[in-house]
Each structure stands twice: as structure tokens, then as C-alpha cells.
Amino acid sequence: MKGLPLVKIKNGERHYLKLTQNQRVQHLFIMVTFILLVATGFPLKFHFYPWAKPMIELFGGLHVTRFIHRVCGVIMVGQFFYHWYYLFKNMALNYIIPAKKTGTFSWGEFGRFVYYSPMCPRKKDAQDIAAFIKYALFISDDMPKHERFHWREKFDYWAVFWGIPVLGLTGLFLWFPVWATTFIPGWAVNISYIAHSDEAMLAVSVIFIWHMYNAHVNYDKFPMSPLFLTGYLPEHLMKHEYYMEWARINRIVEKDPSRLLDLDKEKEAEMLTNQEKVELIREQIEFMKESTTGGKYNRGGSHHE
């Protein structure tokens, strides 16, 4: 995230960076393809229900619905592979290459780099779960202090690493059953249908119940978190839910003020610039009024009162 403002001040409130632009674009691809996969896949699965036929017709018929479903599946799998590239690229740029160039690379340190990366499950996550249970049961008054991503978000994240391979592989077998049976038994195609269908049901349940509640509709963020749109969270949310990350960013900004962007000051400077423009226009208007009413010019350019 080097070069990005870690903190933006807008309307007197601090907003803290949590998702980069690249991460938001990846999320957008997953979100859009997931919604379209559900919207096209469920009518195909539940075609015998009255609501299925209108939905299939809405997409342009059975063949078009299948086509959209498959295209979205390919895009989602492609996004999955891109994310692997994104992960390895970040590992290389943030540790492997700099450490190799300075001659300080070690596998032990690389392991620690991976272990302490934001999405890696760690011992602290287990401690946070235990602390949350105590808080929820009124055993403790203290909520766990989370880092950049807490255990609920990590659950969402790592579920994708199971769900997409299962859905992608079984979807491929269902798309090309004749080809699939050249190296797997025929009954495996039938099992693929069950696995594809049940995994899709599980994914929908997790996204629309677990993820939507935690990310958007709980009492802290209702009706919607701005995070997936802006990449930033307002300070009250950041401090409440990601206290450790809030404190870490504040330390960085304190040491390097260039990582803070004060939009209020920029807006104020822009307003001053606009005011100067308005004043200049007014001066021009006054000058024009004076030149047309206050005197006359002869052909030689001299002014006569």
C-alpha cells in the first residue's frame, strides 16, 4: 500500500485505508459474477418451480441463461487464478526480491512474513474467537481488539479457496460430460452435479447470511459499509472493530505525515482559488462597466473625460 494515503480527512473525520484499489476491483469481479451465477444457476436447478421460468425468460431463454452462467463461471475461476498471482507477486515485491538483493533472505523470516500477513490465520484469531464468545455470553466486558482483518473476514476469505475449486471443477465436468468420462467414471459426473449444487447452496447461505450481516447489516454498519466502494472506513468503525490496525496506521502517519491526505484543506484551498476566480470576474465586470459608462476613447486611443 506504499504511496497510498493511509488516512484521509474528510468533513472533519478521519478515514482509514483497509482495501486497495486492486483489492476492491477483485472484490467487484467476485461479487458481480457470484450474483449472476446465483441468478442464472438457481432457475436451472429449480426449473420445476413457478418462479424459475420467468427468470430464465428474463435472461433470454434457456440457452442464453446457460451461456451467461458458464461465462460467469469462467470469469470467477479466472479471478481465482489471478488472485493467486496477486498473492505471489506481493510476496515477491514485499519480501523475496528486497531480501535477495540485500542478501538477507531466509526461509524462516519468509515463513514469518507469510504467517503475519493480514489474511493468514494465526493464534491470535483463536484467542479473538474465545474473547468474542466470552463477550457475547457476558462473561467479559472487553471485545477483542482486531487487526486489519478479523477472524470472520478470514473465514469468508478462505472459504473461497475451497468453494471455487469445487464449483469450477464440477462445473467443468457438467459442461463437458463426454470429455470428463474419458478419465473419470460416469457416476462421478452425477456426483459432480450433487457437489456443484450443494456447494452453491452453501455458498449462497454463507454470503447472504454470514457475510452480508457481518459486512453490512449489523448495527455498526447498517445499512451498508462503504468499504467495498471506497476502500476506507471512518475512524469510529476502524477504532471499534479494528483497533490494532487503527493504532498501527496512526503510528505510521505520525512518523510519516505524507501518508495522510487532508481533503478538507484541499477543498478549502480550492474554495479560495474559486473565490479568487470570482473576484477576478467581478473586477473584469466593473472594469467593463467603467469603460463603457465612465469615458470615451478617440481614434488615437487617448482617453477623454
Image (cartoon, grey):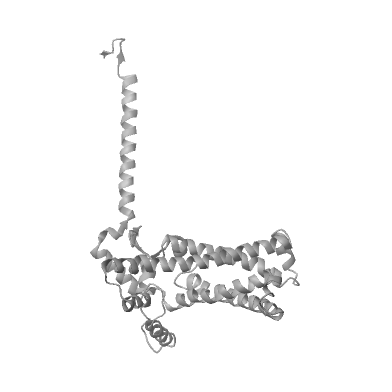
Instruction: From the viewer's perspective, tell me whether residue 234 is left or right of residue 62.
Output: left
**Residue 147 occupies which quadrant of the picture?**
bottom left
Instruction: From the viewer's perspective, tell me whether residue 254 is left or right of residue 17.
Output: left
State the residue at coordinates (33%, 45%).
271
Residue 66, how many percent across, how many down?
Answer: 69, 64
| Residue 173 visible, this angle | yes
Above or below 155: residue 66: above
State the residue at coordinates (46%, 62%).
24
Instruction: From the viewer's perspective, tell me whether residue 226 is left or right of residue 257.
Output: right
Residue 5, how many percent across, how many down?
Answer: 33, 59
Q: Nearer the viewer, residue 277 or 251?
A: 251
State the residue at coordinates (34%, 41%).
274
Residue 36, how many percent across, how many down?
Answer: 61, 64
Tally of numbered tags: 0
State the residue at coordinates (45%, 76%).
154
| Residue 18 visible, this angle | no
